[in-house]
Image (spheres, helix red, strand yellow):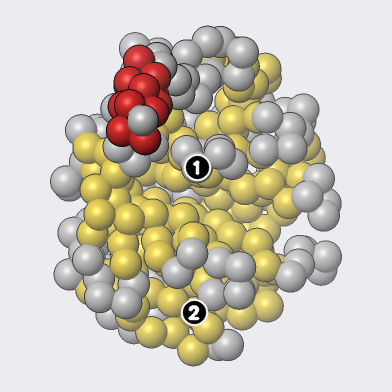
Amino acid sequence: MRFVLCLAVSLALFLVPAVSVSAQPVPTLTPVWETDTLLTTVESAIYDPETNLIYTTNIDGHFMDKDGQGSISTVTTDGQIQDARWITGLNAPTGTGIWEGHLFVTDLDAIVEIDIAAGAVVQRHAIEGAVALNDLAIDDEGTVFASDTGGNTIYALRDGTIEAVASGIETPNGLHPEAGRLLITRWTPRSVDWLNLSDQTLEPVAEGIPGPDGLEPVGDGRYLASGFNGLVYLIEAGREKTLLLDTTEEGQRAADIEYIQTLNLLVVPTMQRNTLAAYRLNWDAGD
């Protein structure tokens, strides 16, 4: 009798249809605004919830020239340029991060630290041996990471001290720290990978992205990754990347993007177009 009962239960479980787990929705993008063309060779954008402003880095020249022409601009969340030359005298500013009221900016071979309230540079953290610093990101403990795309190295600034935390990483660009590791874009391999900082091993996430540049978390375990020629992808480990934006025919670049989760707003620096372009993510677009 016990055997018959077990057999019946087993058959019942076998015959119950499997419950499929639907994929997370993939958003579409709706253009919201674009700034005036006053952001000269704009490379990066970052939102500060304390000031409710977007800060941009403007190279304004060649990305390898120490010409003193680089600047930082401030932009409102509805696309109005508040101050096109809020900070001046930089060289080729690119990546940005904010920690405790200070804006950190990569500038060729140094990390520039700006007091936001004072609107002034307070320190330049020179990095000896840096070739071409690119992106910058800050973890939950205040460690400032900077990628050296030209030097195949990732540096960390902690308590005023700089050290190389990863070397021999081919052309690292975009950075996003999370749970003791870094999500990185790599220019030459055209890939997005997790970098384990303890042993410098790489775990592939996405590949085949032309000119991979900026990275931004969506907030649900997925990420936005930009391709320099005007592409933005939605990526997730173990799934195919999804193309959300393609402005290559318009000649509009997509450099170091920003995603403001509270506003559901994707902000795209367009480089030589000299603008920021903003898009709303529509999450009810289906699977």
Q: Is residue 79 above or below residue 119?
A: above
Q: Sequence-wise, which precedes: disc 1 or disc 2?
A: 2
x then y, percent, for residue 71: 59, 53
x then y, percent, for residue 281: 60, 22
Frontmost residue, 114 versus 203: 203
Horizontal side of 77 relative to 222 (left or right) equals right
Q: Are marks 1 and 2 in contact (CB under 8 Å)?
A: no
Q: Residues within 10 Å of mark 1 (few under 14, many from 20)?
A: few
Horizontal side of 8 relative to 202 (left or right) equals right
Q: Secondary structure at mark 1?
A: loop
Residue position for label 2: 157
- Residue at point 34% right, 72% down? 197
Whether residue 66 is visible: no
Whether residue 283 is visible: yes
x then y, percent, for residue 42: 51, 41
3D distance between C-alphas at marks 1 and 2: 26 Å
Q: Is residue 233 above or below residue 153?
A: above
Q: Which mark is residue 168?
A: none
Place residue 53 in its image quadrant.
Answer: top right
- Type of the residue with mark 2: Leu
Number of residue marks: 2
- Residue at point 50% right, 42% down? 221
Quadrant in the picture for the N terminus: top left
- Type of the residue with mark 1: Gly
Residue position for label 1: 221
Horizontal side of 266 relative to 244 (left or right) equals right
x then y, percent, for residue 273: 48, 27
- Residue at point 28% right, 80% down? 129
Frontmost residue, 119 versus 234: 234
Give the farthest residue toward the front: 1
Q: Please identify, in this view, whether the residue under mark 1 or under mark 2 is nearer the observer.
A: 1
Q: Secondary structure at mark 2?
A: strand
